[in-house]
Amino acid sequence: MRNLKEDYFNPKFSHIYVERAARERPETKRILSRLPAANVIEIGHYKDVFCRKGQNYALQHSAQSLILANRQGNWLYKGADVCQDFGNRHFYYASSVMNCVYDCEYCYLKGMYPSGHLVAFVNLEDLFLSVSEHLTAHPMYVCISYDTDLFALEGLLGYVREWVSFAGRNEGLTIEVRTKCANWDAWKEMPVLPNVIYAFTLSPQDVTARQEHGTPSLSQRTRCAARVLRAGHAVRLCFDPMLYCADWEAQYDGMLLQAAKDIPFSDLTDVSVGAFRISQDYLKKMRKQEPYSAAAQFPYQNVGGVYRYPRELEQKMLQFMTRRLRSYLPEGSIYVEGAKG
Ligand code: SF4
């Protein structure tokens, strides 16, 4: 679908579906006021639109609609085994938004959601209540930008700012905000807090240009990460997922040189490294959505329900990256998913 003319589709968020129960909420009104030209359609439940059968994720993503809803039930989850927990015992992730404005070919969301539209839940205070309840029992580490890229939506939703303000009132809470966004304006007035970590995902420029559609370039991300670091924030770099290509060693070497030129690695909180991996159910659906993507169609090996690169290749990629990183950072600041020996 990416080679179809852009003007073939409605512009992003030209249509906004609003749950009846969310219609009068102040957050809904605030978000709608930022998209004054949009057609607003009232619906009974977000699933009436988001979970219909027979939707085409790629086509919908090209003309992405926004759905504003009130979330019921649980939206705070224990971290999955395939996710890096950075040594945190009580590791959770929160899903206040489903789907992303970026379009990475390897994104697991394509295998997870039935629709390419984007759902934002407007009752964040219920999520904060649930976090507060957990905090009475133990400290928490919560990844708040998991099934989306919250920073890429900050100008519209402002959810990172709300989370940061919540973290400022709750010492036992550490949040990680993962992003590929490079819009410094979104950080400009964020208070500096020790319990908020901004995690920039970096990929070689070739990977970004070919497979991370709509995202900022590598140099935009490294320059933004450097600025965020200079402003005094805690910054993590994520080389995860590493993706295989014929000249992957040269690609990842070039990326590290570029990153180290812009960013003083010794000032980073830490870095994470991981090779691409995905659950078998998600990959099956993702392959249908991405028939021409090298990342989606690679002949991965199924290890206990998770597709990964063949073990020898995976270990080679992880060891290559960690060896390089050791020349910039102490061993204890390098977190590696799935490394053996
Ligand atoms: S930025 Fe992250 S969440 Fe968004 S499409 Fe890419 S991989 Fe998926």
Image (cartoon, rainbow, N blue to C red):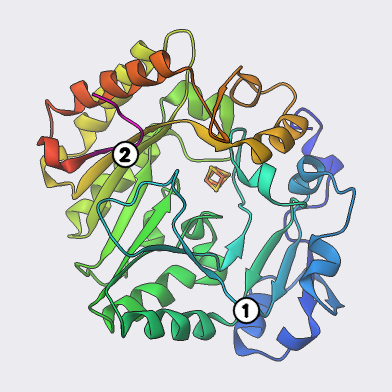
Nearest-to-viewer mark from 2 and 1 = 1
Query: Mark 2 belongs to which amino acid?
Result: Thr
Q: Quadrant of the C terminus?
A: top left
The span picked out in magenta is 335-341
**Residue identifier under label 2:** 222
Dividing the image into four quarters, tell me where ligand 1 lies: top right
Query: Would residue 183 be seen by someone viewing this image from the given angle?
Result: no
Q: Please give left or right for residue 317 compared with residue 230 in the image.
A: right
Q: Please give left or right for residue 28 compared with residue 160 in the image.
A: right
Question: In this rendering, is residue 260 above or below 195?
Answer: above
Location of residue 110 by image quarter: top right
Query: Mark 1 belongs to which amino acid?
Result: Gly
**Residue identifier under label 1:** 73
Location of residue 333 by image quarter: top left
Q: Residue at x 57, y 24 (%)?
A: 210
Q: Nearer the viewer, residue 301 or 175?
A: 301
